[in-house]
Image (cartoon, rainbow, N blue to C red):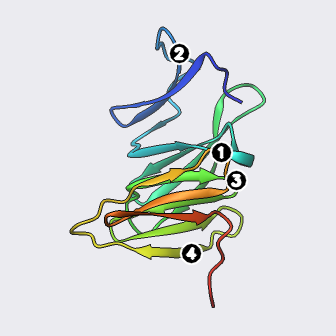
Amino acid sequence: MLEPSCVVAMCDNTVSLCHATSLEMLGSGPIATGAALLCLGRGASEGKICVAKKKSLHFFRISEEGAWEEEKEMAVPDTPMALEWHGSQVAVGYKREYCLLSLDSGESIDVFPLDAKTAMPMLCAIPSSDELLLRLDKMGIFLKWDITASR
């Protein structure tokens, strides 16, 4: 778990752990470089970090020694533009769609298409809830994290 006196920061595509008041970098160096987005884990994934780099997601956790180490990497079909993480799922907003990714199986569930010309993906996990808020054109859609693909 992160100490309350620490901040996970992204600057110039570099993700680092910093002291909350002095903003001095903690640890032996940056957690990741080449980062486009980051999100913190919620629920069962609390204390972990997901970093988006071009067409991949990198998942980090704190080792027993207190250093950040990469736990998993997943290839994704496009560059993520929005991320939220809850338990074993990551919601990803791409230019043309929203998807839910299962970290356990690697399965991707398409949630909603987006009009790349008019919509910018936006995601927000609702605190103390099992819901996710998506922006779809000019309205918000609430979605349960436990959605399953209809077959």
Farthest-out residue, bottom: 151
Q: Is residue 74 left or right of residue 93?
A: right
Q: Which residue is mark 4?
A: 109
Q: Earlier in the sequence, mark 3 or mark 2?
A: 2
Q: Position of residue 26 (x, y in %)?
A: 56, 17
Q: Mark 3 = which residue?
A: 87
Tell me how far mark 3 sits from mark 4, CA to CA.
16 Å
**Which residue is found at the position 40% from the left and 71% from the top?**
97
> Type of residue at label 4?
Ile
Judge from the rendering whether residue 13 lies leftward or rightward of residue 65; answer left or right.
left
* Secondary element at tag 2: loop
Number of numbered markers? 4
Q: CA distance from mark 2 to mark 4?
A: 37 Å
Question: In the image shown, does 133 or 48 lie closer to the viewer?
Answer: 133
The picture places residue 141, in percent across and down from the top left corner, at 48, 65
Front residue of 149/17: it is 149
Which quarter of the rendered picture does the N terminus lie within? top right
- Amino acid marked by disc 3: Gly
The kind of residue on which mark 2 rests is Ala
**Does label 4 or label 1 sit earlier along the sequence?**
1
N-terminal of the two: label 2 or label 4?
2
> Is 118 drawn above or below residue 90 in the view shown?
below
Q: 132 or 37: nearer the eye?
A: 132
* Separation of residues labelled 3 and 1 (CA atoms): 6 Å
Distance between the alpha carbons at the discs numbered 2 and 1: 20 Å
- For numbered disc 1, what is the local secondary structure? loop
Query: Mark 3 or 1 closer to N-term?
Result: 1
